[in-house]
Amino acid sequence: MPSNIEQAISLVLSSHQSPQVSTVLNAYLRIAGFPLATPDAVTLFERALDKHPHMEERPAGTVVTKAITDVRQDYYMRVLDLGSLVMPGIVDGLYKCPCCGRNMSEDEMKRKVLALEDGLEMEQYHYLAAPEKPKKIKSKRRIATKTKARMRKARPFDPYGPSTSASSM
């Protein structure tokens, strides 16, 4: 069964339109059943583009797969060209990684888009570029030694004796 993004591309191609970002986005939102005014529409479209396998993963290299790859590359180049004033999800000049959501600079994002154009897999590039975090050193738990000041006096206990509630008040 074809995915929603594949159905959107085939709908655009069957209506004799070129698969551009705007036409594919509108077709995808109609097929997926989302209203066009959804604030998360761009995020949903990005996820759908990123979930679809790349050209080299599909043996036949269908027209739909090539169109999705072209739309994906065109979309990310437009995101980089528009900058932080127009696109949601761009904060302080940092772009969100489509794989994991990590913020990255414009240069890193361009390298990622160029890696997509060269035919490298996004996940392969992403794992190569991920910085390694140093391990945190946990301090050992210390147990305080008991001193005479911290120890309570042992009270005599007589189960048959008078009530101790009056003496403790």
Image: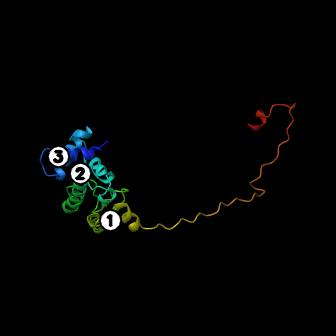
Q: Residue furthest front?
A: 60
Q: On the image, numbered disc 3 is attached to which residue?
A: 12
Measuring 24% from the left and 40% from the top, which residue is drawn there?
31
Q: Secondary structure at mark 2?
A: helix
- Residue 68: percent from left, percent from top: 24, 53
Q: Amino acid at mark 2?
A: Val
- Residue 150: percent from left, percent from top: 74, 54
Measuring 38% from the left and 67% from the top, which residue is drawn there?
129
Q: Is residue 114 left or right of residue 147?
A: left
Measuring 36% from the left and 65% from the top, which residue is drawn there?
125
**Image quadrant assignment for residue 121:** bottom left
Mark 1, other Cα within 10 Å: few <14 / some 14–19 / many ≥20: some
Measuring 14% from the left and 52% from the top, which residue is drawn there?
18
Q: On the image, numbered disc 1 is attached to which residue?
A: 120
Q: CA distance from mark 3 to mark 1?
A: 27 Å
- Residue 152: percent from left, percent from top: 77, 49
From the viewer's side, name the closer residue of 161 and 127: 127
Q: Amino acid at mark 1?
A: Leu
Q: On the image, numbered disc 2 is attached to which residue?
A: 64
From the viewer's side, name the closer residue of 28 and 12: 12
Query: In the rendered image, which quarter contains the C terminus?
Result: top right
Mark 3 and mark 1 residues within 8 Å of each other at the beta carbon: no
Mark 3 and mark 2 residues within 8 Å of each other at the beta carbon: no
Relative to 36, say whether 163 is above or below: above
- Residue 65: percent from left, percent from top: 26, 53
Q: CA distance from mark 1 to mark 2?
A: 19 Å
From the viewer's side, name the closer residue of 151 and 111: 111
